[in-house]
Image: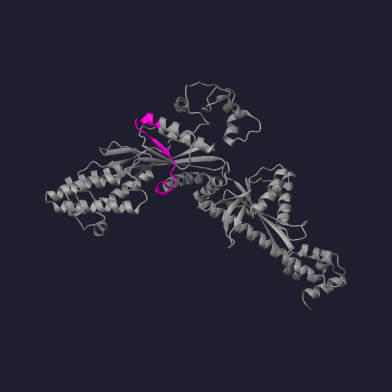
Amino acid sequence: MKDSAGKIIYIGKAKNLKNRVTSYFRKGQDHLPKVYKMVSHVADYDFIVTDSEFEALLLECSLIKQHTPKYNILLKDDKGYCYIRVSDEEYPRLTAALQKEDDGARYIGPFISSGALRQAVREANDVFKLPTCSRRFPRDIGKGRPCLNDHINKCMGVCKGNISAEEYRQTVEQAVDYIKNGSKESVKRLTEQMNAAAEELDFELAARLRDRITAIKKAAAEQDIVIEQHTEDMDIFGVSADSKTAWGSVTMYRGGRLYDKYSAKLGMTDEPSRMREEFIAGFYSQRDEIPAEVLLDEPIENADLLERYLSEKCGHKVKISVPQRGTLRRLAERSKENAAEQLSIGADRSGSEIAALEELAKALGLGKPPRFIECYDISNLGSADMTCGMVVYENGRPRKDLYRKFSIKTVAEQNDYASMSEAVERRFKRYLDGDENFSTLPDLILLDGGKGHVSVITPLVRSMGIDTPIFGLVKDSKHRTRAAAAGDREISLSAYKKAFALVTTIQDEVHRFAISYTKAKHTKNSFALTVTSVKGIGEKKAKLLMTAFKTRSALQSASREELAQAAGLSRTTADELYKFIHKE
């Protein structure tokens, strides 16, 4: 696709190019905002015919890298790289560096994520008990008392002269190997060295190596960055999106250990499978090192094509899969959470809120996470004081300024279905009439009730031209949220913990809001009925009084003149009412 200046703004592939291209310009097509915006700038297009889908994929990746079109996912690294730095001295120090310096030190890398590298270097220094103090060796050996790290056994005590420069350098190399190759390889090599030292009767060295092996295993057991049961090299991709934009994250494991992390803004929200495919292809187009296993948080349509592309690029078999359970599933969810946290920074929301909306969209089969959610609940005391509460959540947070309450007017007997119908119809009629107080159209409607409520409300809303998805919230015997109802089926939310927590919160909030209105209305109506016992005051004047003063305390604070003016009372009636209110 090209703009009016002839610049390429989008590159894509399709089995049937005619159907794909015409779908962009077809009227009434339900496009994502990204597609609408792109299409508005398209002035011309060009195409290349290929022999196969795979050849089309190769060409697409090559052209995107060459032309960097605006509406394709472009992975630009604006954070720079970082390195492991081994200082050039007799007793070298192991640190993380953001850039290479011409200082004679040895730099290992580059690594993408400075945070992951710093964590790995810190852990290596702890496991191998390398000094991190400001002393310089061998200059400061034997000078002054050892620091606290030596006393708590977090340092090998170089300052006491306990270790030679040669053994120290060997330890530093072991630490570097631990960072680069993971805990399993480090344990294997150290075990070989320990056995060799024992055979040569160097039991002191063997004991130190044994302690290092123990420390590595302890770190593996205590930290999530080491997964001993899965020692294959693998990259784990996660994508998180809201209604406007998307972020992707990759966590890289080498030898069972977290090696690096990469996050990138993917631009405007696109079709989920398409976003992931472009993210993966773009990520590996910039690097040659590709692990044998690539894990995803969600399935993609062209996994077999991508597997072939990556396998041919790196020269070995690459498998793409979506883990369903266990440690690998948890790690895939963690990658998605990393992407959600990046997305939350620009959206002024927490990663948990974003993840909850994504889970809810997945559970209910929505095309994208809902931005505005409306939830309705009916409350009554028998057939009296029937009300409906409407609460609104925007991006996972309550918008109390958009809450609305309805007093049921057309239903005489207790009937939740009829009451809900009246409230919902009034709400959307106000929207269609252009009422500013009801101008926000929801992306999702939730009803406090089961299949019956959904079957009654859905035809009503559709008849008004509103196509917002509608689901009921089903409670268990203890009045707790259990599932979502849609048509003749129920959708369990127990597997979606964050979505389940959000829906439960919304259901509790609408229940609280509806009940509070019913109680307030009941209190007001009860007092209004007692006021009618005063001679000269009927139901109409009692209603005028309660409308003017709202509460019992406000009515009691009013003067005789204010009472008379509010309901058009005579001086005598106002005086009798005043005495009645104050029980004189």
Whether residue 395 is situated above or below residue 12 in the rendered picture? below
In the figure, residue 414 lies in which quadrant?
Answer: bottom right
Q: Position of residue 482 (x, y in %)?
A: 57, 56
Range shown magenta: 309-328
Q: Position of residue 522 (x, y in %)?
A: 72, 65
User: Residue at left 59%, top 36%?
Assistant: 33
State the residue in front, 24 or 111.
24
The total of numbered circles placed on residues is 0
Q: Position of residue 399 (x, y in %)?
A: 62, 52
- In this rendering, would 281 be left or right of 555? left
Single out the residue that lies furthest toward the front. 488
In the figure, residue 524 lies in which quadrant?
Answer: bottom right
Residue 317 is a magenta residue: yes
Q: Position of residue 75 (x, y in %)?
A: 45, 34
State the residue in front, 318 or 342.
318
State the residue in front, 489 or 345.
489
Whether residue 200 is situated above or below residue 574 in the rendered picture? above
> In this view of the protein, can residue 337 be seen by the observer?
yes
- In this rendering, would 408 be left or right of 92? right
